[in-house]
Image (cartoon, coloured by chain):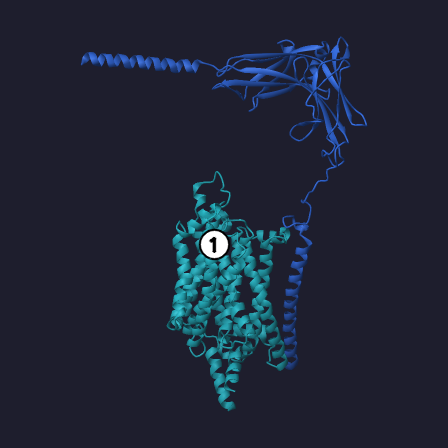
């Protein structure tokens, strides 16, 4: 029996150890690096010539950088959903998905922090937040909560990794010397003793409890950056809940996309099964319905009243210059995924993957629609501004930096999936044993 | 046909001539200016002049900006020049009587002020004059809140009380002066005095309750505009309510509300306390591992 177990364990380990990039992996990484380099060049131009290289002017002072920031913050919430909520609820089927969620969370929160510094123009202005920042400002709350969430996400990635690092060190031949040095540095002290497991389990449980309010705070505070500003479209008491529901949706969408890609790339069909897609499909459809509900609240109620001061903003979204994008975001980001995922056939891997992509793409444009159209319709229009200020289309530098940051986040996910097992090895072994018993 | 052409040509020539004549005549026509001078003396100190320049546009007087005026004392000569001034957008210009004219000012009990505009491409030249006698007001108050204003004029070499001068006794407010009681104006008696009872007891003063009383003669044909002030502690004390320096959500960083500081620091200390304890757990795990290795 023990021999059978050790053979099964060996099989799991061999299946789940990080694999070197194949040809497609190298091409994928090369494309991401290329996008990052173009983004860096665009950022160099922004540093050299100033924010004037962007299309942001007096009206639209928050463009796609801030849309991107809100998107990253939103998608980072997935770490708390998959890891913390499911773990506390004693949901075991999600175990193969936890590391994917944690890696996405870390990558997203890193680039959320970076893109906000990009938006400041000169990076040294970040220092001003500390020497002149006011605790009364939601921007300072955001800085505090993002830093905290970043640290928690790192810990939540690190603690469950410790047993896997022991395995990685044991299987030296599967990784380079440099990687072995790195593994030894971060986790050679893990011996898998009961005392270590006890401390680790306790720490993970504390993290899972802590990360939920912090995750709620991070996105609520991000929503307050808008909601505490008296502007059409932002002046809402509902914004915190609206943002959090949207964040959970895009996070879950991101996970199903990553699940599908990793499953295909690393041949993980035995571990990330069709049942996982079925269950994640149900979660995504529930979250999409919830987010749709909040959208109905956010748009239908103001549209019913149609206050004079909000009329231009709402009409711009429903039938005006932003209408194609608005209806695209609503239909692609919510309605079509709901229709796909409501049916059992729609919850098979490929349709779930397609629905996941739609959710993520729709979510990015939805963030753009939350940020930019409002800025074009202030309660008090500015006088004596050039007509071009009344419209906004990002410059190539903005596109390059935004796409570069998205590529950067995916590059971080790719690199972490190359270094660490994308499915927790030790937890999988333990769970298989528990199931067998 | 030829005759018709000739007639049309002739008619057009006449119309052209008339229209060009009209255009030329309009260009040559200059506007008329109305210049006036007012004399002021506040608190019996340095007198000054206010010159106003207006012109009639569509039947209404409108102020004229940038009109240069020469102001003279008694006669139009270089030695009696008070000032050269230019009107502002309200069509007004002011000038004090300079110290250089002190001897001339003291030599007479009446003076005539002259204002002259030499004319420019838009306006004809214009002049104005004003004659005033030297006068002053003294203000006095009693503990039962009576205000007495006495008007004097200079006769020969001494100040003599003047009877029958209309004046106002009021309290100075932000935009205008408020009469001290229901009587709008007062007239001096044979002793040159006018007395008013102060009936604005609850009127807000400054932080010490001080208010400023004024006695003033306005647009008097003989004396011009005279005004005298006196500060009295008859108002109610004004305690300013200023949120600028308080701990509010819109205050500076060093004035953060205590409740916000308490909440924010409590949350940050609690959460980071937990995180630090988790980092300590890593070191504990490490210690256990190292002990086994040893």
Residue B249 pos. (x, y %):
63, 50
Q: Nearer the viewer, residue B251 or A310?
A: A310
Horizontal side of A436 relative to A210 (left or right) equals: left
Residue A190 pos. (x, y %):
60, 78
Q: Residue at x 66, y 75 (%)?
A: B284
Q: Residue at x 63, y 11 (%)?
A: B78
Horizontal side of A324 relative to A430 (left or right) equals: left
Residue B84 pos. (x, y %):
60, 17
Q: Nearer the viewer, residue B77 or A165?
A: B77
Give the labeled residue for mark 1: A301
Chain letter for the residue marked with disc 1 in the picture: A
Residue B120 pos. (x, y %):
51, 15
Which chain has been coloured blue in this picture? B
Chain A visual colour: cyan
The residue at the far left in this view is B1
Q: Is residue A300 visible?
A: yes
Q: Quadrant of residue B290?
A: bottom right
- SS class of the residue under badge 1? helix
């Amino acid at each position: 029996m023990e021999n059978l177990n050790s053979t099964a364990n060996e099989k799991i380990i061999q299946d789940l150890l990080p694999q070197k990039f194949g040809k497609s992996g190298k091409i994928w990484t090369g494309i991401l690096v290329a996008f990052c380099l173009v983004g860096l060049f665009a950022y160099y131009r922004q540093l050299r010539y100033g924010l004037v290289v962007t299309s942001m002017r007096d009206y639209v002072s928050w463009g796609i950088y801030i849309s991107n920031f809100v998107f990253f913050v939103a998608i980072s919430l997935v770490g708390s959903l998959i890891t913390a909520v499911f773990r506390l609820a004693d949901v075991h089927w999600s175990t193969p998905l936890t590391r994917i969620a944690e890696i996405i969370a870390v990558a997203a929160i890193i680039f959320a922090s970076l893109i906000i510094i990009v938006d400041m123009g000169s990076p040294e202005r970040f220092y001003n937040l500390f020497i002149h920042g006011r605790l009364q400002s939601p921007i300072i709350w955001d800085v505090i909560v993002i830093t905290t969430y970043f640290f928690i996400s790192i810990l939540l990635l690190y603690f469950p990794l410790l047993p896997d690092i022991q395995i990685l060190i044991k299987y030296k031949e599967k990784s380079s010397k440099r990687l072995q040095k790195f593994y030894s540095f971060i986790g050679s002290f893990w011996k898998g003793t009961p005392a270590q497991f006890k401390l680790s389990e306790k720490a993970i449980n504390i993290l899972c409890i802590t990360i939920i309010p912090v995750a709620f705070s991070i996105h609520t505070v991000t929503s307050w950056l808008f909601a505490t500003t008296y502007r059409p479209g932002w002046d809402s008491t509902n914004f915190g809940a609206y943002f959090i529901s949207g964040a959970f949706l895009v996070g879950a969408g991101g996970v199903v996309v990553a699940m599908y890609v990793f499953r295909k790339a690393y041949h993980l069909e035995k571990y990330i099964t069709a049942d996982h897609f079925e269950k994640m499909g149900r979660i995504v459809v529930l979250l999409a319905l919830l987010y749709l509900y909040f959208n109905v609240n956010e748009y239908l109620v103001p549209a019913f009243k149609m206050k004079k001061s909000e009329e231009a903003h709402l009409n711009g979204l429903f039938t005006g210059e932003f209408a194609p994008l608005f209806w695209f975001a609503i239909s692609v980001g919510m309605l079509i995924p709901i229709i796909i995922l409501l049916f059992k056939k729609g919850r098979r891997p490929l349709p779930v993957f397609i629905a996941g992509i739609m959710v993520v793409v729709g979510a990015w444009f939805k963030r753009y629609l939350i940020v930019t159209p409002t800025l074009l319709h202030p309660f008090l229009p500015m006088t004596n501004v050039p007509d071009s200020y009344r419209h906004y289309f990002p410059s190539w530098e903005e596109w390059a930096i935004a796409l570069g940051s998205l590529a950067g986040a995916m590059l971080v996910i790719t690199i972490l999936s190359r270094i660490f097992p994308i499915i927790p090895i030790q937890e999988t072994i333990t769970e298989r044993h528990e199931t067998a018993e | 046909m030829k005759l018709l052409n000739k007639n049309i040509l002739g008619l057009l020539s006449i119309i052209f001539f008339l229209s060009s004549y009209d255009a030329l005549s309009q260009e040559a026509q200059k506007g008329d200016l109305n210049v006036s001078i007012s004399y002021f003396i506040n608190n019996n100190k340095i007198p000054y002049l206010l010159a106003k320049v207006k012109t009639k546009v569509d039947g209404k007087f409108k102020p004229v900006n940038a009109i240069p005026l020469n102001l003279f004392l008694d006669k139009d000569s270089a030695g009696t020049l008070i000032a050269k001034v230019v009107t502002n957008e309200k069509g007004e210009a002011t000038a004090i009587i300079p110290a250089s004219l002190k001897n001339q000012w003291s030599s007479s009990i009446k003076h005539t002020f002259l204002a002259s505009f030499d004319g420019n491409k838009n306006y004809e030249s214009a002049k104005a004059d004003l004659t005033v006698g030297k006068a002053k007001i003294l203000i006095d108050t009693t503990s039962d809140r009576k205000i007495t204003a006495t008007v004097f004029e200079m006769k020969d070499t001494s100040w003599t009380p003047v009877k029958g001068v209309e004046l106002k006794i009021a309290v100075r407010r932000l935009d205008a002066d408020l009469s001290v009681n229901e009587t709008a104006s007062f007239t001096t008696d044979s002793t040159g005095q006018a007395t008013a009872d102060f009936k604005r007891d609850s009127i807000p003063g400054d932080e010490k309750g001080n208010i400023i009383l004024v006695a003033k003669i306005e647009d008097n044909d003989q004396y011009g505009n005279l005004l005298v002030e006196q500060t009295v502690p008859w108002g109610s004390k004004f305690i300013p309510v200023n949120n600028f320096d308080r701990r509010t959500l819109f205050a500076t960083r060093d004035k953060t509300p205590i409740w916000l500081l308490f909440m924010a620091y409590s949350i940050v200390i609690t959460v980071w306390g937990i995180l630090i304890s988790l980092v300590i757990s890593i070191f504990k795990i490490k210690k256990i591992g190292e002990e086994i290795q040893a």
